[in-house]
Image (cartoon, grey):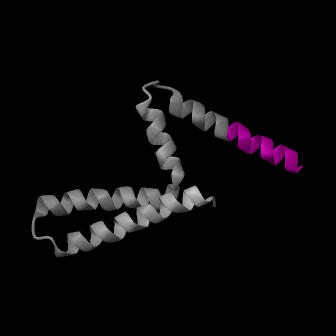
Amino acid sequence: MTKRDALWRSAGAVLCIAAGGVALTAESAPLIVLLFLVVLFGLTLVINGKRVAIAVQAERRGHPHTADIIHARRIRRFRRNIDEAR
């Protein structure tokens, strides 16, 4: 795991803990729902790390197939690494 990936994952953990703690003490139902969404985003960061940021950047650039291109490139790179290991 790279330092950058660890940073994204720890940011997700901080989001989960902070939003969960506030949600436990909140009285307002709409605030709890909003904080639940923040907790889900934090869990996504904890699980996927920097890949979330890469996917968001790809979607923001506006090209509809950017995410598909990144995914295909990652699969080709993974297959190449397997073939080199043989």
- Residue 42's image quarter? bottom left
Which residue is at the front of the view, 11 or 84? 11
| 21 w.r.t. 65: above or below | below
Q: Residue 37 appears at what percent x and percent y?
A: 28, 56
Q: Residue 57 appears at what percent x and percent y?
A: 46, 38
Q: Residue 62 appears at what percent x and percent y?
A: 42, 26
Residue at 22% across / 71% down in the picture? 22
Q: Residue 38 appears at what percent x and percent y?
A: 30, 58
Q: Residue furthest right?
A: 86
| 20 w.r.t. 83: above or below | below
Quadrant including the N terminus: bottom right
Q: Residue furthest top?
A: 63
- Prevailing SS of the magenta stretch: helix
Query: Seen in the image, is 30 located left or right of residue 68?
Result: left
Residue at 51% across / 56% down in the picture? 49
Residue at 21% across / 74% down in the picture? 24
Q: Residue furthest left?
A: 28
How many dots with numbers? 0
7 is within the stretch colored magenta: no
- Residue 74's image quarter? top right
76 is within the stretch colored magenta: yes
Residue at 63% across / 58% down in the picture? 2
Query: Seen in the image, is 39 located left or right of residue 45?
Result: left
User: What stretch of residues is rendered in magenta?
Assistant: 75-86
